[in-house]
Amino acid sequence: MAGSYDGAIIGDRFRLTPAPTLLTRTASIAPIGFSRLRSDARHVRAKDVPPEAAYSLHVALQPTAVNLWIDGRHRLGKAASAGDAFLFDLRCNPVSELDGGFDILRFYISQDSLDELAAERGWRQAVRLETDRLGAPDPVMLGLAHALLDRVERPSERSALFVDHIGLAFHAHLTETYAVVGPPARRATGRLAPWQLRRAIDHMVAHLDGDPTIAQLAIECGLSAGHFARAFRQTAGVTPHQWLMRRRVERARELLLHGSLELALIAAACGFVDQSHFSRVFTRLEGESPGRWRRHHRN
């Protein structure tokens, strides 16, 4: 099972060094995985895929020539463009042949995790994924791929809340776009109860300098990860990750205004990875750098 999302094994399958990989624990059974596959080689034929009850979805980040075999039969040959998506059932030995270099974001989910998250959404039957349009443009998946690029390439700046949120968005898009199921019997909707919102917020504030996950916050509220994430956003108007970033910036403003700590120490006290990460987030939310904000408001 580990080979499905292990960076070294995925890289070897595409004849690369270990592929940068992110894992999310939005499902309790197995993680959802995100890997970047990139090569300048003129020609690469991937190795055979051991059969597994799981799916991978590859999003092209640059144009590349693709030939695909499924269970030994040639299924597709095309010049793929950035944003083209290829959904593979890993039980069927999908093998790619890529020419002219490639840059791909690979999304992975096991059948067990797919079923677990689908049950939380109220689907009436087991989910199966398929498409008759291999290599068709999928702008939603391209957007998710670009959102993940920095996190995949910068291990030190990985936020569990952010990665978990992308995992849930990936699952939602899969079930709405590629799932062979009937419409939902019920959809988990509604808002968090006041005590649930307070408990989630208290947990994030208590771990402001840590890296809480959606699963941990959901347990605090007695909910599944998917239900919690949707209910929190409907209640608070932002995702848990966005709320946490704003609260960290609020705390940083207090320290900038009323203390003399260096920026690196403020970054650490507020849960940012380093001063550079702190400066980028603070500038995005406040419109100016922490140093300039401190000089402006103290004057």
Image (spheres, rainbow, N blue to C red):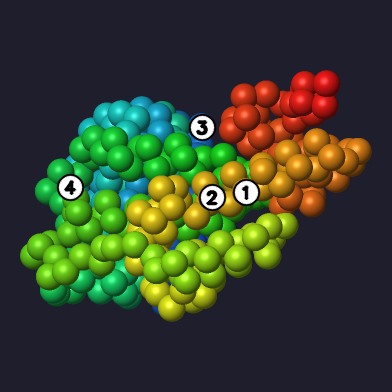
**In the rendered image, which residue does mark 2 sit on?**
243
Query: Disc 1 designates what residue?
Result: 247
Q: How far apart in space, not on screen, are marks 4 and 2 (Cα)?
A: 45 Å
Q: Which one is in front in this view, the residue at disc 4 or the one at disc 1?
A: 1
Q: Secondary structure at mark 3?
A: loop
Up/down of 123 relative to 211, above or below: below
Q: Mark 3: give few (<14), some (14-19) or many (20+) Cα within 10 Å.
A: few
SS for tag 1? helix
Q: Is residue 128 above or below residue 36?
A: below
**Residue depth check, mark 4 versus mark 2: number of the one nearer the observer:** 2
Q: Residue 262's image quarter? A: top right
Expressed as whole percent of the image width and height from the top left, the position of residue 9 reads: 52, 61
Q: Residues within 10 Å of mark 4 (few under 14, many from 20)?
A: few
What residue sits right under mark 4 in the picture?
75
User: Hey, what amino acid is under mark 2?
Assistant: Trp
Residue type (three-letter) at the residue carrying disc 3: Asp
